[in-house]
Amino acid sequence: RLDGLWYLCYDGKELKTEEKAMKKGGLQLEKDGSVMLGGVPYRAFGVNCFNLASQCIGKEDSDPTLAIKTLQTLKENGVKVIRFSTGGFYPSGWKDFMDHPEKWYKIYDAVFETASKLEIGLITSFFWTKMFCDVFDEGCAVAFANPWNNPSKSLAFMKDFTQTFVKRYAE
C-alpha cells in the first residue's frame, strides 16, 4: 500500500506532491519529517531491495514466487519496511515493461498483496535511474527541460506510469 507515503500525483494540469495518510491511524509523515503511527513516533528496521519485483521478470512470462519468498525471509528477519524499484534499471527493463506491462503488474500485485499480509511496509522508487529516457531517445537535458510545458515522451511516460501505479495500489 502506498498510503501514508509521499507520492507524485498528476492531475492533468501540473505535477504536484500530495500527502495521503492512511485511515485508521496508519503511517503519517509530519511536516518536520518524522513518521508517526497512530500518533506515536514510528521507527522500524528496513532494507533496500532494489530487485524485489524485477528479479521475477522472465523473457516470456513472470513468476512472483521469488518475490514472495524474499518478502517471507525478510519478515522472518524482522524487516518491517522495504524500498524497491518499480521498473527496470537499464532502458531494456523499461522497454520490457512498456511492451509487456501485464508481466510486471502480475509481480507488483503479488508483492503488494504479500507485503500487506505480512504487514511489511513498501516504499516504491518509481524511477531508480534516469536511463529510461534512452527508451525514447531523449537525453535528460531534453526530457526534463521546462517540465511544465514540455512535449517530452519521457516526462509523459513518467506522469502516466506514476499516476497508473498510484491509482492501482493506493487503496
Image: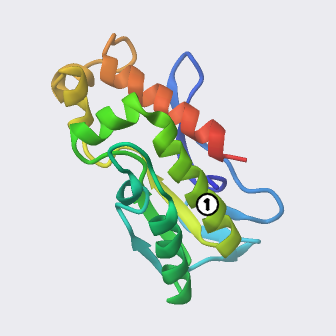
Does 37 appear above or below 16?
below
Q: How is the image coloured?
A: rainbow
Say which quarter of the image contains residue 111.
Answer: bottom right
- Residue 51 lies left or right of residue 38; in this view the side is left
Does 140 appear above or below 63?
above
What's the amino acid at mark 1?
Glu
Residue 146 percent location from the top left of the image = 30, 18
What kind of element bears circle 1? loop
| Residue depicted at x 79% and y 65% | 25
Residue 141 percent location from the top left of the image = 17, 25
Residue 60 percent location from the top left of the image = 37, 42
| Residue depicted at x 47% and y 44% | 104
Residue 135 percent location from the top left of the image = 23, 27
Q: Nearer the viewer, residue 101 or 19?
A: 101
The residue tagged 1 is: 30
For the N terminus, the quadrant is bottom right
- Residue 119 lies left or right of residue 53; in this view the side is right
Q: Nearer the viewer, residue 113 or 9?
A: 113
The residue furthest right is: 24
Answer whether residue 31 is visible to the viewer in this image: no
Does 13 appear above or below 107?
above
Say which quarter of the image contains residue 153.
Answer: top left
Mark 1 nearby-residue class (10 Å; few <14, some 14–19, many ≥20): few
Looking at the image, how many numbered discs can be counted on the residues? 1
